Amino acid sequence: MQVKIVIGTIAFMLTMMIMGFAALREPTRLEEYTHAFEGRSIENGAKIFEGNCATCHGMNGKGEECENTAGEKIGCQGLPLNYQPLLCGDISDRTARMNAMNWAGTKDAFVESVVAAGRGGTAMPVWSAQFGGPMRDDEIKNVVAFVLNWENDALCDEELPTFDWPTLADTFLTDFPDGDAANGETLYVSYGCSGCHGAPDGSIPANVGPDLSAIAVDGGTRIEDYTAVMYVYESILEPNAYIAEQCPTGPCVGPPSAMPANFAERMSANPQDMADMLAYLLGQ
Amino acid sequence: MTTFVDQVREMGFKQAAIAKADEAVERITAGMNISDVRGALRGDEPRRPNPRLRPHADGFWLHIRPSFYHTEVTHFYPTFRLGWLSTFMFVWETITGIILMIFYTPSPLAAYNNMWNILANVPLGQLMRNMHRLGAEVMVLVVALHMLRTFITGSYKKPRQFTWATGMILLVLTLLLSFSGYLLPWDQLAYWALTVFLSGAEAAPAPAAVNENILLILQGAPSLGAGGLLRWYLFHVLLMPLLLAIFFFVHYYKVVLHGFSLPPGREKIGEDTAKRVPRTERTYFIPDILTSELMWSALTTLFLVAGALWFWDAPLEHHADPIVTPLHVVAPWYLSWSQGWLKLADKTIVVGFIPLLMVAFIVMPYFEVGKSRRYADRRVGLSVAFLFMAIMLVSNWMGSPEYRVESSAEQEVSQEILPQEGPSVLLGVPYEHMAPGTYLPGEEVAGNPHLTEALEEFQAAMYRHSCHVPGNQNERLPREWDECEIAVLDSGDKRYGNFFKDAVMPDPYAELVIEEFQPNLLKLTLNYEVVNPDNPDEMLVESDWVSYRHADSNYEEECRYANKNC
Ligand code: HEM
């Protein structure tokens, strides 16, 4: 019996020592698991993004290269997400996109709210099951974690080029007189115009924005005193300035227009793109 | 009535305090004062009348325990302490379970996150979870072994038939208790195991209307969701433990009433002398059995804590997803035999057979009325028991992942290298060693033993799922596959097999591509290409399998455990 008491006491003390050892290790372990949870959330998000978002935003989130489910290249309908104005905040973590959209909450909540509720009047669908979309809350959280994970120093430290767009197309064209229509056609796809306005060769019809094949003529009829060039130039830079009447699925909605208002920013790096685009759209 | 103050006046403070303490101890132990307790611990002879019997007579906790045992049944044989251990495990599960309950909400919106919260925010939370889950599996094992021992020692025979019958009910309750807890993490493992189980309930040999309503009761809605989770949670924390406690007391009451059966050779055939214990053969509960039980409690706790901390890790897969069926759905091992049976016979037959089998077990002692408990006289009974066990083991193996319905060869390889769930050798490679690039199976990466090891594993998996067609013009990469066993199907297509499987890839090409995808996020792709050996223009297989790996996801940690395959 005495032996049993001794064995029992030793076993009990060993158990307490093991518990003590485990307790000492706990702070590190908890931290590891917190990170592991975030890491796996991002991994899951990547899968979800690949399956649901890449068709419109591009697998690399740049909004430049999109493929449909059959693996064919299509124009991107969505905005870039791997993108400084969306991800990089100022000192109080406010981003350019939050300011532009008058968002009062945090950055994470901004992204989460767009993903969960979609953006009315645009092609961005509703995703959360709470609002009638297909995804559970945890899936929304995962894909948002993935989108936010694009933020990094290189992206945020990059100087975004700015370009002072002249109000009038003619002024612009005196600075950039030589538009390359062939390159314009490439850009029309890579900027994602074809995702909404239809492929240049007509293989994919216009589905969000009006068909642009006759814009060289129609453009001149939209606003009084506007030539087609002036109109197209303004339509690209400020989609909200004038909302076209007839979209493929019915009357166009807006303002705000379903056409992203960020091409002015995106073309600033290379204003020649605008000249090429105009040459392509108006020369055809 | 003398008050404490009176006592202090009478004998001084020190003496009065000692007398008071003595009185308190006597009340708490329901009859033993301080010197009695010391005497018992020291192993002295008790005074007369024996104060060590009073806790049994007057105390609540010990009144259900016998005050002495036959010395013959206090050794390791014949009980192996298995009945006691079953009781211990039930108490263990109750304590760890209550702690987990504090951090758990039975809702599909919260349950899975609760699990991660327990792992990532609750101090010692992972240990608690591991201990509870390990305990659940150990309890099933222990109860089954206890049943086996009572069978082998013939303890189910008259007058203990009813003890056996209540024991069977306890076994079923233990299985249900363990299995109802399975759903609670609301991960893929849980969700699909329960879905398979419930689809069984639907196939019971009864009118469809009955089955449908049973299913409705079991899952609370036409499909498993919030209502179902709440129900299974309540089964798990309320109904099953309550039933188990009730039946435990009935079981134990009968055990004490009849006395533990002596080892079969120790009494005359047909006699039951367990209750007639000569004075010289008595081992008293206080102190001998009590210290022995305390020692076993301490040892079992030690093993379970150490096991849960260092050797075993409770699984947690991805969030439950009703739309995504995992490649391999597996039942917990203790129900694996039923999955094995489902592969042999029609569902309705199996589902109808299992309750019949349970009833047969319950009533068995009332029909098996052989008088002798001795092994030599029970050759037939013992042989049947061992045959049954052998059948169960084989069925269990057939229901296990080893013996599963195979998906296509390249998916099986992917599932080994980059499984849908859980860690693998490749996922266990430290993140900084996952150098971006394109790698072939079995390739040696200079200066990178971790990745090399994973690629060896890739090669080994490919080897098991590939074969070589001699003279194949379309061979992409000459690798050392065994020669194909070619079978021509009725459709005219050929099927290529090897030593391991019927359907494998003839002269396949496979690669692993590691790409930097986001800050701290890698994209891992397994590409497979198999050209038809008879027709260079036809691809038999052209597929890829994508997985992502984050720097912090820490699969390395999981790989340290004995129950993880990497
Ligand atoms: C939760 C499950 C169970 C608990 C907690 C439990 C507990 C106990 C305990 C404490 C004993 C005392 C003897 C010993 O330690 O071996 C006992 C005896 C017994 N148990 Fe169980 N038991 C359980 C399940 C079962 C099962 C599944 C069976 C068989 C179908 C069974 C059949 C018996 C029989 C026949 C005895 C009498 C043994 C004898 O007198 O030697 N019990 N049980």
Image: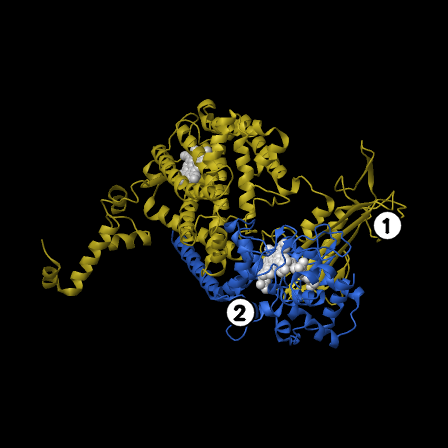
Chain colours: A blue, B yellow
The quarter of the displayed image where residue A98 is located = bottom right
Q: Is residue A69 above or below residue B162?
A: below
For marks 1 and 2, give the CA distance.
59 Å
Q: x, y (%) of residue B174?
A: 46, 39
Q: In terms of depth relative to the viewer, which is nearer, A212 or B236?
A: A212
The quarter of the displayed image where residue A176 is located = bottom right
The residue that label 1 is drawn on is B475
Q: Residue furthest front?
A: A225
Of circles 1 and 2, the one toward us is 2
| Badge 2 element | helix
The residue that label 2 is drawn on is A99
| Badge 1 element | loop
Left or right: A42, with B464 as reference point: left
Q: x, y (%) of residue B45?
A: 29, 49
Which amino acid type is shown beneath numbered disc 2? Answer: Asn
Label 1 marks a residue whose chain is: B
| Residue found 65% across the figure and 40% down from its top | B404
Q: Is residue A134 above or below residue A33?
A: above
Whether marks 1 and 2 lie on the same chain: no
Q: x, y (%) of residue A53?
A: 63, 56
Label 2 marks a residue whose chain is: A
Ligand 1 quadrant in view = top left
Q: In terms of depth relative to the viewer, which is nearer, B346 or A91?
A: A91
Left or right: B352, with A190 as reference point: left
